Amino acid sequence: MGRPHLVGLTALQSGTSCQLRETNSGEIRYNQVLGLRGKEIFVTVKGEFTITSNAIENLTVTIDGRPYKPEGEVYGRQMASFPDPETVPPVVPVPPAKTAPAKAPPAKAPVRTR
């Protein structure tokens, strides 16, 4: 097991419950209803962990300040597993490819008349 990591939990809807359990030790690190919408709660964990919630789609999770999403689509009363961030870094969004602006066809020179 590596170093401790700081997990941030934020409820997007008031009344969202959350239980965070360390996978290796089985220890429950947090088990409450997240209070005010938008207020982040911080929990220290080591290694992998799972989160169980009554409305898991209403949770945002950060690990050491970086956003993480559970694998697959999760909704309602479900459990989501999160990897040890030391061994599996978060997915970094790929920036859109830059494209060169299209070149305009050269303008024709005005025809000179005598």
Image (cartoon, rainbow, N blue to C red):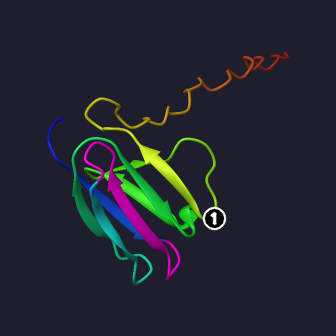
Q: Quadrant of residue 91?
A: top left
Residue 13 is covered by the magenta coloring: yes
Whether residue 107 sits left or right of residue 31 in the image: it is right
- Residue drawn at point x = 71 percent, y = 23 percent: 104
Q: Which residue is mark 1?
A: 76
Q: Is residue 100 above or below residue 61?
A: above
Residue found at x 35% / y 31%: 88
Residue span colored magenta: 12-26
The amino acid at mark 1 is: Gly
Name the secondary structure under disc 1: loop
Quadrant holding the C terminus? top right
Does 103 appear above or below 72? above
The vertical placement of 40 against 52, above or below, is below
In percent of the image, x 63 and y 48: which residue is there? Answer: 73
Neighbor class of circle 1 (other Cα within 10 Å; few <14, some 14-19, many 20+) is few
Position of residue 54 in the picture relative to residue 32 (left or right):
right
Residue closest to the eye, 108 or 95: 95
- Is residue 43 rendered magenta in the image? no
Instruction: Estimate the x, y position of residue 35 in percent, counting from the top left.
Output: 39, 83
